[in-house]
């Protein structure tokens, strides 16, 4: 079952940073936080993941709070192609399962 | 590296008929997942394989759904008989990791099933 809470929708102006929040207050110490996005008619695409430290790759940055109860995905310069549904997932440690919630629908506005 | 392959891309059947979906994971990936995604919802895990063994099928409606992963590579998901509420996208994903690793899932583009 999903262990994360996300706002259902957000807007962001093109060229600005998109900050997508996620609450995972029941996360265990050895569980990772993953972010995926899904564009219409495609399968979910992996973005980034982290355990305790902040992470950055070519797509995004992931900021995890010190108590690990929440995180923020940052798309530094949003483009129209970033319009998608973004899922925050806590990976089950015991069984290696990924449980998706309902995600955040991000709309990048020209 | 080639991605997760799924077929068919689309399928339309009448209720009470049967249907099968096929998935070829990324080469070398030991873990394979099937998800069901109903329009407007996030993907729901149906079944997880580790090699050719089932790890988790707690959310699989076993009266009508079945899945197998022969030889620990390709997998098929079958529905028999189909109901209207089975209309959804069926996603296959694979991962190289075992428990305790942090390798991400890689998804195929899914099979869109419409039951009329």
Image: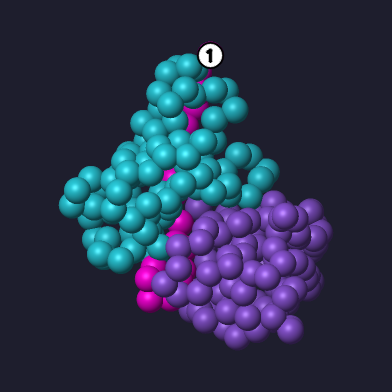
Chain colours: A cyan, B purple
Q: Position of residue A16 (x, y in %)?
A: 42, 18
Q: Circle 1 is placed at which residue position?
A: A110
Q: Residue at x 80, y 60 (%)?
A: B7
Q: Residue at x 72, y 76 (%)?
A: B73
Q: Residue at x 50, y 79 (%)?
A: B56
What element does badge 1 sit on?
loop
* Range of magenta residues: A92-110
User: Quadrant of residue B61 in the image?
Assistant: bottom right
Task: Please tell me whether residue A42 belongs to the stretch shown in magenta.
Answer: no
Q: Position of residue A7 (x, y in %)?
A: 35, 39
Asked if residue A30 is positioned above or below residue A7 in the image, the reply reads below
Q: Is residue B36 left or right of residue A96?
A: right
User: Quadrant of residue B84 in the image?
Assistant: bottom right
Q: Is residue B24 visible?
A: yes
The chain identifier of the residue carrying mark 1 reads A
Q: Quadrant of the N terminus of chain B?
A: bottom right
Task: Please tell me whether residue A101 belongs to the stretch shown in magenta.
Answer: yes
User: Quadrant of residue B24 in the image?
Assistant: bottom right
Asked if residue A38 is positioned above or below residue A82 in the image, the reply reads below
Q: Is residue A82 left or right of residue A54?
A: right
Q: Position of residue B74 (x, y in %)?
A: 75, 73
Q: Residue at x 47, y 22 (%)?
A: A77
Q: Quadrant of the C terminus of chain B?
A: bottom right
Q: Position of residue B59 (x, y in %)?
A: 50, 74
């Amino acid at each position: 079952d999903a262990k994360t809470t996300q706002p259902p929708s957000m807007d962001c102006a093109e060229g600005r940073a998109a900050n997508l929040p996620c609450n995972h207050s029941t996360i265990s110490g050895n569980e990772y936080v993953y972010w995926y996005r899904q564009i219409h008619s495609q399968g979910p695409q992996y973005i980034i993941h982290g355990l305790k430290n902040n992470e950055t790759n070519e797509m995004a940055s992931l900021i995890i709070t010190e108590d690990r109860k929440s995180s923020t995905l940052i798309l530094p310069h949003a483009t129209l192609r970033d319009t998608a549904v973004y899922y925050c997932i806590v990976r089950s440690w015991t069984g290696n399962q990924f449980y998706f919630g309902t995600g955040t629908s991000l709309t990048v506005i020209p | 590296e080639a991605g997760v392959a799924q077929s068919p891309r689309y399928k339309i059947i009448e209720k009470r008929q049967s249907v099968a979906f096929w998935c070829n994971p990324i080469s070398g990936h030991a873990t394979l997942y099937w998800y069901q995604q109903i329009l407007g919802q996030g993907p729901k895990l149906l079944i997880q394989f580790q090699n050719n063994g089932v790890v988790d099928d707690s959310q699989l409606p076993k009266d009508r759904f079945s899945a197998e992963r022969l030889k620990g590579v390709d997998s098929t998901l079958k529905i028999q008989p189909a109901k209207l509420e089975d209309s959804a996208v069926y996603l296959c994903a694979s991962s190289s990791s075992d428990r305790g690793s942090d390798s991400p899932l890689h998804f195929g583009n899914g099979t869109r099933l419409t039951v009329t």
